[in-house]
Amino acid sequence: MAKRPRTTRIKVEQSSGNVFADLGFPNPELERLKATLMLHIHRIITAQKLTQAEARKVLGIRQANMSRLMHGSTVSHSVERLIKFLTALGHDVEVVVTPALQQPPRPPQISPNRIVREGTIPRR
């Protein structure tokens, strides 16, 4: 009789919806925004069938930075720079502000004499 392979239990946690927050990045929302912009850039370059050499000329960057961009490294690119890349590739960028899906807890409001927390009634 053959032995069954031993199985290992893996602890699974539900995602917060932002992988960068889940992994403990210092500025997860900024990293998520940069990753989204980079994904759009990558898709546009691919759709336009540009080589990395052609794309780097359009974007005005060195080959090393082009390679980092195409491989998803967010370290060397600011949001502003990524937006400039999108416009150089012939796309407009629009910023839309909407309420957050989950409101983070509000910090305590500080008054000169007491701290008032949401949901509590201060004594008089």
Image (cartoon, helix red, strand yellow):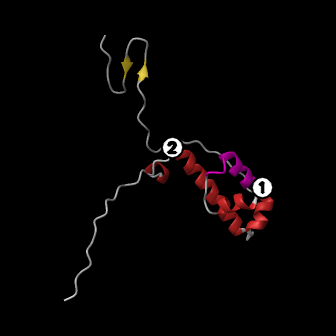
Q: Quadrant of residue 5?
A: bottom left
- Queried whether the magenta region covers residue 109, the answer comes back as no
User: In screen coordinates, is 97 left or right of 124?
Assistant: right
Q: Which residue occupies 76% across, 63% down?
A: 55
Give the answer, above or below, for where 29 lies relative to 116.
Answer: below
Give the amino acid type for the residue marked by disc 1 in the picture: Ala
Rendered image: mark on residue 88: 1
Q: Earlier in the sequence, mark 2 or mark 1?
A: 2
Q: Nearer the viewer, mark 2 or mark 1?
A: 2
Dividing the picture into quarters, in which one does residue 35 lie?
bottom right
Residue 18 screen position, x and y as percent = 48, 51
Dot 2 amino acid type: Pro
Give x and y (percent) for residue 121.
Answer: 32, 20
Q: Is residue 8 above or below residue 36?
A: below
* Residue 112 rendering spot, x and y as whole percentages: 43, 12
Looking at the picture, does residue 54 appear above or below residue 98?
Answer: below
Q: Quadrant of residue 70?
A: bottom right
Query: Whole-percent x and y of residue 78?
Result: 66, 47
As drawn, 53 above or below 23: below
Q: Residues under labels 2 and 1: Cα distance?
A: 30 Å
Label 1 environment density (alpha carbons within 10 Å; few <14, some 14–19, many ≥20): some
Q: Nearer the viewer, residue 81 or 8?
A: 8
User: Residue 103's mark?
Assistant: none
- The residue tagged with tag 2: helix, strand or loop? loop
Segment colored magenta = 75-87
Residue found 31% across the figure and 59% down from its top? 11
Residue to which mark 2 is pinned? 26
Q: 85 left or right of 39?
A: right
Task: State yes or no: residue 76 in magenta.
Answer: yes
Number of marks: 2
